[in-house]
Image (cartoon, helix red, strand yellow):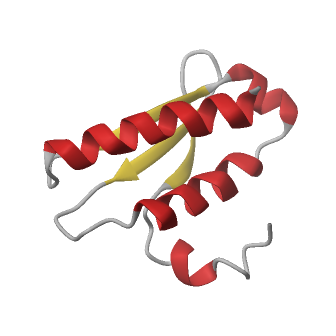
């Protein structure tokens, strides 16, 4: 998948790889949820794209995911966490 295909979705900054690493050298993925309605389809496409970027070596180290739900409702946070379980397990396996 090329970035140019999903550029309008990426511009919404639904999720991003900050470039930072955790203690295990795993990549940090941040999802800043907000009061606006987050489209789960768009978030899923964004996650699929972002998780396809790192090399296999980086993926093997794993990811630390930060879901910032301070400006969102709990049911949205819960849905995102469940979606992450599926996405990250599928991408990393």
Residue 5 screen position, x and y as percent: 72, 81
Residue 80 screen position, x and y as percent: 37, 44
Left or right: 64 as drawn, with respect to 49: left
Compared with 43, 92 (above or below) is above
The quadrant in which the N terminus is found is: bottom right
| Residue that appears at 72% across and 73% down | 3
Q: Quadrant of residue 10?
A: bottom right
Residue 79 screen position, x and y as percent: 33, 43
Q: Residue furthest top?
A: 24
Q: Quadrant of residue 26?
A: top right
Q: Quadrant of residue 92?
A: top right
| Residue that appears at 54% across and 24% down | 22
| Residue that appears at 65% across and 24% down | 62
Q: Residue furthest right?
A: 56
State the count of labels.
0
Q: Nearer the viewer, residue 76 or 9?
A: 76
Q: Nearer the viewer, residue 56 or 85?
A: 85
Q: Nearer the viewer, residue 4 or 85?
A: 85
The quadrant in which the C terminus is found is: top right
């Amino acid at each position: 998948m090329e970035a140019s295909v999903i550029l309008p979705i990426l511009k919404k900054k639904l999720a991003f790889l900050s470039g930072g690493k955790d203690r295990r050298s795993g990549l940090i993925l941040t999802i800043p949820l907000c009061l606006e309605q987050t489209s789960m389809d768009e978030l899923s496409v964004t996650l699929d794209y972002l998780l396809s970027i790192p090399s296999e070596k980086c993926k093997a180290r794993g990811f630390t995911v930060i879901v910032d739900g301070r400006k969102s409702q709990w049911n949205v946070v819960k849905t995102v966490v469940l979606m992450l379980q599926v996405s990250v397990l599928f991408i990393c396996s």
